[in-house]
Image (cartoon, rainbow, N blue to C red):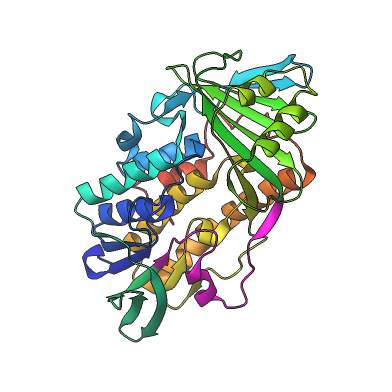
Amino acid sequence: MTGQNVHVVVIGGGIAGTSAALALHKAGISVTVCEAHPGSAGDLGAFLTLASNGMRALHAIDAATVISGVGFDLTELSAMGADGVPLMTRPMGESGHPPYRFRCLRWSALIAALQAEVVRRGIPLRHGAAFVAATQDASGVTASFADGSRITADLLLGADGLNSLVRRIVDPQAVTPRYAGQRVFYGYTSSAQPPSAPGRITMVRGQAASFGYAVSPAGETSWFARQSATAVPETGPVTAALRDDLVQALRLDSTPTADIVAATDNILVTNTSDLPDVSTWSRGRLLLTGDAAHAASPATGQGASMAFEDAVVLAKALRDSDSVDEAIALFEHTRKPRTRRNMEASAALTGRGTPPPVTPAPTSPDTELLRQMNWEAKLLG
């Protein structure tokens, strides 16, 4: 089918929504992005890592350079025991290929960069557009918004995250997000000086928490701590008591983790959530993508990268198929097995309270993924 004959309305201007818009635009498909937040939708505190597969997907849609000035490369993964003794240090992902190296950056900076690129390419991005309902007929799908406005399109893409309204419309019986069993603390400090090396992220197998940190070229330490416990009643800035409890728990180990936390002025906490499984991704001309379809706990660190892969596959499916219905089926057939494996792996790691995996990602992706992320190659054949 020709992309010029299709219009897609994207609900959600976060990572999944903006990357989908960039991919669709590259495929020649008309797209409008609608974001409920009046400004940036980014979490101001969290940081994340983009894996090599995610960087490949960004390159496929000509968006990797957008984040070249944001964050820093990660090329080495190190693991440390509770006694402070290094367990191993290995290359991380496709470290030998600079364009596909892991990258560490702030969530808000990534979203801001992607939204800016959406605007630069001339893609309509509506802020303050709170989606409330969708109706379908033979001519397509119409999205309705809280301000009374409507947009009619050939496809409505639900990129509205973990608590997706589009998912509830697609399947009123769909599973709801569940607490995955761990609190996640995170912060930044330039005062701590933990052992590190350029481009290294260190995972610590602590007794009370799984901890990870990376030091930027400017000397700022970004860190997180995953602690198996009951959910905190409120997420956001931590109380003094909660901060002291975390430091005291980390003092059980002979590692730099407690000192890193003690040197951090502003600490945030959130509860890990995921989806057990989402069997239904589409209904008519409504389709889910990103966390709305396959939200995983953060243990595998693949959330953003999976969303980028979704974007490439969806754009190619629409580009290469003879109808929107055929493209939706091809997208689901291609993406469901891979995203399900990531959801299951993350749930298993989080549920056992084990640390993040210390085995590095493969130094090269599998052949099938390479073909999927190759913009010139068709998804089938």
Vertical comparison of 270 with 323: above or below: above
Q: Is residue 276 left or right of residue 49?
A: right
**Magenta span:** 157-180
Quadrant showing the N terminus: bottom left
Q: Is residue 242 visible?
A: yes
Residue appearing at x 26%, y 52% in the figure: 26
Q: Nearer the viewer, residue 29 or 216?
A: 216
Estimate the x, y position of residue 369 in percent, counting from the top left: 49, 44
Q: Is residue 214 left or right of residue 36?
A: right
Q: Nearer the viewer, residue 270 or 113?
A: 270
Q: Nearer the viewer, residue 79 or 210?
A: 210
Magenta stretch encompasses residue 159 = yes
Magenta stretch encompasses residue 77 = no
Of all residues shown, which one is farthest toward the front? 240
Q: Is residue 257 left or right of residue 374?
A: right
Residue appearing at x 45%, y 25% in the figure: 73
Vertical comparison of 306 with 191: above or below: below
Estimate the x, y position of residue 274 in percent, counting from the top left: 63, 55
Q: Is residue 364 left or right of residue 122?
A: right
Count the labels in the image.
Answer: 0
Estimate the x, y position of residue 115 in percent, counting from the top left: 31, 48
Residue appearing at x 53%, y 47% in the figure: 303
Vertical comparison of 264 with 83: above or below: below
Q: Is residue 323 visible?
A: no
